[in-house]
Amino acid sequence: MLNSPDQDVNVTWPSLPGFDFGIPKAPFEANPQQSYIAVVAYKPGTTLTYFDNNAGAAPVLEFRYDIEVIDLCPPDIDGNGRVDGGDLSIILGFWGQSVEPPGSGADLNGDGLVTGADLTEVLSFWGPCS
């Protein structure tokens, strides 16, 4: 069961292994600082909460999720928390070259080439990332 202010999902687990269900991401995007997932399992007719495996092996509960990472300081190419000479030297080192995939490394504007547009991005963010 998934509980949030905006979402309930009830799942009946079949006796087959590998059962999956999806959880919409909208409830977590609305207020990410106060979002959580709680999983509760119970056997009908009991008051106990547990995970059980009738085959005798240890029960397994696996969570997999995708998180979209938002880069708030894309011109910080070297990842030191500042846009500075290190990032400028990377731009100049790849100057005029094509980059695959577009938008990676020194190609800050995503056009597949390292050009003046990418240099402009570095200069416009110059200083500490906030």
Image (cartoon, helix red, strand yellow):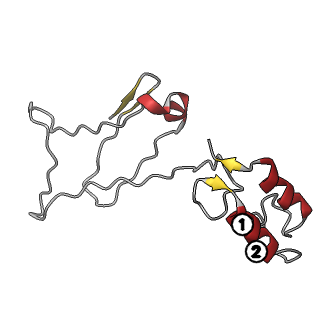
Contact flag, marks 2 and 1 (Cβ < 8 Å)? yes
List the residue tagged with mark 1.
Answer: 104
Q: Quadrant of the C terminus?
A: top right
Tell me the quarter of the picture where residue 9 sits. top left
Q: Indicate whether 41 appears above or below 88.
A: above
> Which residue is rendered at x = 50% and y = 52% of the image?
66
Please state if 57 lies on the left or on the right of 14 as rendered. Answer: left
Residue 101 visible somewhere in the drawing: no
In the image, residue 105 sits, relative to residue 13, either above or below, namely below
Residue at the (47%, 24%) spot, across then down: 6
> How far from the left and from the top, in percent, is residue 12?
30, 42
Image coordinates of residue 112 in percent, x first then y, are 84, 69
Lateral position of residue 16 relative to residue 27, left or right: left
Q: Residues within 10 Å of mark 2 (few under 14, many from 20)?
A: few
Front one among 75 and 70: 75
Which amino acid, by three-letter code, is at mark 1? Answer: Ser
Q: Along the line of sight, which residue is nearer the eye, 35 or 14?
A: 35
Front in this rendered view, residue 129 or 14: 129
Name the quarter where the N terminus is drawn.
top left
Residue in the picture at 54% in, 34% down? 29
State left or right for residue 2 relative to residue 83: left
Mark identifier at residue 19:
none
Up/down of 52 relative to 94, above or below:
above
Q: Which residue is mark 2?
A: 100
Question: Tag 1's secondary structure?
Answer: loop
Instruction: Tell me the kind of residue under disc 2.
Output: Glu
Q: Identify the secondary structure beneath mark 2.
A: loop
